Image: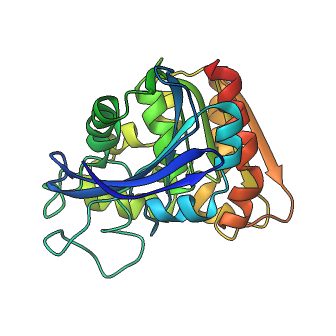
Amino acid sequence: METVSESKAFGGTQGVYRHRAATTGTDMTFSVYVPAHVEGERLPVLWYLSGLTCTHANVTDKGEYRRACAEHGIIFIAPDTSPRGGGVPDDDSWDFGQGAGFYVDAIEEPWAANFRMRSYIEDELPGLIATEFSMADLARQSITGHSMGGHGALTIALRNPGRFRSISAFAPITSPLHCPWGEKALGGYLGPDRALWRPYDACALIEDGARVPEILVDQGEADGFLAEQLKPELLEAACAAAGIGLTLRRQPGYDHSYHFISTFMADHVAWAAARLR
C-alpha cells in the first residue's frame, strides 16, 4: 500500500492511499480518516460508497464527516467507484464505465476482467484495511453511501447479513431494475437476463428474503433524479412488506448534491455510532 497523502484533521489523520487490486487488476485509490486514539485502541469503521462520476475525493473534500467521526471515534473509509486507467474499458456516457462501477461483478465483455467492484468492496479492500490499519475493528462495521453508492450500501448489507451494525443511505437508487440508470448499468455489466440483476437490487433482495433490522435514508424532495431514478417509495413498500424498520426522511428543498449530503452527514455518523457501541 502506498501513501498518497496524510494530513491532520480534528486531532486525527486524513489519509489517501493507493494499492494494486487483484480483483480489478488495476491500481485503486481510497481515503481513510482515523480519529485520534491511544495506542492499542480499536475503533469501529464506517464505509461510505460514492455515486456516479465520483472518486474517493468527492466525499473526502466535501462530505464534512471528520468532526463527527472524531467526536464518536469512528474510522471513515471512502473507496473509488470503479477501476480506472488507460487499459480499462470505458464508455462515452457519464453514467456507465469508469466512474460508474455500480458495485457489481461484471460478467459481460469487455467489462468482466476489471469491473469487479462487488468483490473489491466486500472482500479485497476490507482485507487490506485489516492488514494495514491495526486500529480498525472490523467486528464493528457500518455502511452508508450516496445515490449509486446508496444502492451499493443497501445491497452489500442485504447480501451480508450480520456484517454491518447499521445501514444508511443518502438519496439511494433503491431499485435498479426499475430505473434507467440501473437498466443501463445492470444490462451492460450483467447481460439481458434480469434474474441475474436481482442480487444488485435492494428491493428485489428484500422480496427474495434478505433482511436487516433497520435502515436510515435521507432523500431531498428537490432532487432532480427523485421520480425517475431513485424511487424511495419502492424501498418503503418493500421494507413495510418485510417488516424492516425504515426511517425515510424526506428533506424539503434539498437536492442531490454534496450540499445535501454534508448537511445530514453528522446524523448518519451518529446513527452508526449509536449501533457500533
Q: Is residue 22 above or below residue 270?
A: below
Q: Nearer the viewer, residue 137 or 156?
A: 137
Q: Quadrant of residue 16?
A: bottom left
Residue furthest out toward the bottom:
92
Q: Is residue 39 above or below residue 263?
A: above
Residue 210 location (% of width, % of height): 48, 23
Residue 175 visible: no
Give the residue displayed 17% in from the left and 75% down from the top: 86
Q: Quadrant of residue 121?
A: top left
Q: Nearer the viewer, residue 257 or 182?
A: 257
Give the residue displayed 26% in from the left and 66% down from the top: 84
The image's colouring method is: rainbow
Give the residue displayed 62% in from the left and 33% down from the top: 238
Horizontal side, residue 75 vs residue 218: left or right: left
Q: Nearer the viewer, residue 251 or 232?
A: 251
Residue 161 location (% of width, % of height): 46, 20
Horizontal side, residue 208 vs residue 62: left or right: left
Which of the image's four quarters has the C terminus? Answer: top right
Residue 168 location (% of width, % of height): 62, 38
Give the residue displayed 61% in from the left and 22% down from the top: 276
Q: Nearer the viewer, residue 48 or 89?
A: 48
Residue furthest out toward the front:
39
Horizontal side, residue 274 vs residue 276: left or right: right
Q: How many marks?
A: 0
Residue 19 location (% of width, % of height): 23, 52
Residue furthest out toward the right:
252
Q: Is residue 134 above or below residue 101?
A: above
Q: Quadrant of residue 244?
A: top right
Residue 92 visible: yes
